[in-house]
Image: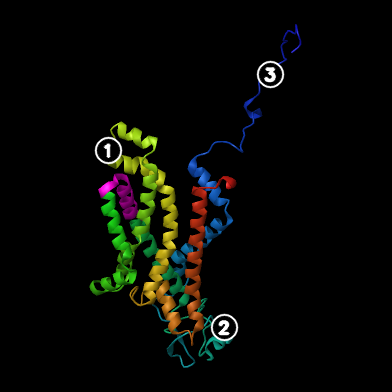
Amino acid sequence: MQSGYTPQKGDFTFLHRQDLSTDTNFASQSYWKGVFVHFFHNRRAVTGLVIVLLILFFSLFGPVMNSFGYRDIVQYRNENNKRVVAKGIAPQIPALHRLFTGEELEGNFSEYTFLFGTDDLGRDLWTRTWYGARVSLLIAFVTIIIDMMIGMSYGLISGYFGGMVDNVMQRFVEIANSIPRLVIVSVLAIFMPKGMGLVIVALLLTEWIGMSKIARAEMLKIKEQEYVLASRTLGAGNGHIIFKEILPNTIGPIITQVMFSIPTAIFTEAFLSFVGVGIVLPQCSVGTLIEDGFNNITTLPYQILPPILVLALLMLGFNFIGDGLREALAPKLEDM
C-alpha cells in the first residue's frame, strides 16, 4: 500500500460463498470413509467383492431359475410315450454328450435346458450346484459370526485382566488348539447324526481360536493407552472399558480375520462333506457335489467342474476381499 493512500469505496469487495475454494485433496474425512475409499481403489478387492456378490446372487436365486428342485430326477417321454429317467445328460448338445460319455442320447430333450448337465441320477446340476453353494455359505456365515463373538470376547477378557487369568485362559487355548480337527469330528460323529449340525458344531469348536488370539493381541496393545486410563479414573467398570472403549478400536483387525476365516470354513465344510461326515444326501453342499463328481469322474467328468469352480471362486474372492480390507484398515504410508 502506498504511503498516504486513502481507501476508496469499491476498492474491496466481499467474496461470495461460491467463490471460495475448498482443498479437496486434504479435506478431513472419517476413518471409515477413508477405509471405504481405499478399499474401492483396490482393483483386486473390488474384483473379489464382485465374484462373491455374483455367487451370493446365484446361490439365492439360481435354484429357482428352472423348474427342477435339487432332489428332483429329470424324466422325459421317449418315442413309445414312456417316461424314462435322464441319467447323466450333458448340457443339451448330443455331440457334447457323446464326447463326455461315448453314448448316444435317447429320446427328445428339446423341452429341457441343462446348463451344467445332470448327475448320474438325472438331477439337474445347475440347481444342485447353487443350492449346494447356498448351504456351504450358510454354514460358513453362521459359524464365523458365532466364532467371532466367542473368540473376540474370550481374547479381549484374557488380554485385559492379564496375570493369572490370562495364563489360565491361554493354557486352555493351547490345549484346544493342539487337538486335531479330525479327532474332534470323529468324536462328534459318535454322538451326533451326520448333517449340517455336525459340521456347524465342529467349526464352532475350532474356528474361534484364531479370532481370540487376534483380539488378545489388540487388547495388549491398546489397554495401556491414555483414554483407557481416563475411563478407569472416572470410575468406568471393566465391562464398559472392554466392550465400549476398547472393542471399537479393535474391530478392524477382527473384520479382516473374519474375511480370511470364511473361506477356511467353506473349505473345511467341503472337506468334511467330501469324506462323508458332512451333509447327508439328497441334500447337497459344494463338498458333496465334488464327492459325487469324483466318484463319476471316469464316466461323467463334466459333473465335477461346476462345484470345483464355485469353490475356487469363493476362496479366491474372499481372500481378495480380506487382502483389500487389511490394506484399507491399516494403509501403508506410501499408499495414502
Q: Amino acid at mark 3?
A: Thr
- Distance between the alpha carbons at the discs numbered 1 and 2: 70 Å
Is there CB contact under 8 Å for labels 1 and 2?
no
Q: Residue 129, located in which quarter of the rendered image? A: bottom left
Q: Earlier in the sequence, mark 1 or mark 2?
A: 2
Q: Residue at x 33, y 57 (%)?
A: 146
- The residue identified by callout 3 is 13
Is there CB contact under 8 Å for labels 1 and 3?
no
Q: Which mark is residue 237?
A: 1
Numbered range of the magenta stretch: 148-164
Q: Earlier in the sequence, mark 1 or mark 3?
A: 3
Residue 117 against residue 328 in the figure, above or below: below
Q: Nearer the viewer, mark 1 or mark 3?
A: 1
Magenta span has 163?
yes
Q: Is residue 122 visible?
A: no
Q: Is residue 50 left or right of residue 18?
A: left
Q: Amino acid at mark 2?
A: Ile
- The residue identified by callout 2 is 93
Q: Where residue 145 sits in the image (x, y, percent)?
A: 36, 56
Question: Secondary structure of the magenta portion, mostly?
Answer: helix
Badge 2: how crowded within 10 Å, few (<14), some, or many (20+)? some
